[in-house]
Image: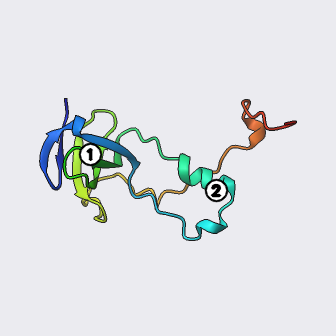
Amino acid sequence: MLLFSCPNCGPRNETEFHYGGQAHVAYPDQPGELSDREWAEYLFYRQNTKGLFAERWVHSTGCRKWFNMIRDTVSYDIQAVYRMGEQPPEGLTAPPAAQAKSQPLAPAEANPTNTSEGV
């Protein structure tokens, strides 16, 4: 069992929380101008970091507020917890996703499961 430290309620059992994905993912500036491919990249493609990673969590059975956590994905060691809208504490190496360059999707012909041709 892990203890998560909610910034509003204090330490609580991990079962009171739900994972919300990668933290600091910026919403597109012009969402109406995105292609389907760009929407797919925004919605589904995230970093899969081994080591320190900034995550969003919600205290679903407590205060029901969202917060950010920097957690080591290898050891599960929690490095920092901070409120939404705040920047990660200085010195932690988990870069915000907004600063990371997104990798382009692989061409459709490189995907052997693509069955859209001839449909």
Q: Which residue occupies 29% across, 61% down?
A: 84
Q: Is residue 103 visible?
A: no
Disc 2 is placed on an element classified as helix
| Extreme-right residue of the structure | 118
> Which percent across, then down, holds residue 97?
44, 56
| Res. 60 mark | 1
Rendered view: 98 above or below 30:
above
- Mark 1 vs 2: CB contact within 8 A: no
Q: Is residue 53 visible?
A: yes
> Which percent across, then down, holds residue 90?
25, 61
Within 10 Å of disc 2 (Cα), the crowding (few <14, some 14-19, many 20+) is some
Rendered view: 107 above or below 93:
above
Q: Amino acid at mark 2?
A: Glu
Distance (Cα) linking label 1 and label 2: 31 Å
Q: Nearer the viewer, residue 30 or 103?
A: 30
Residue that mark 2 sits on: 38
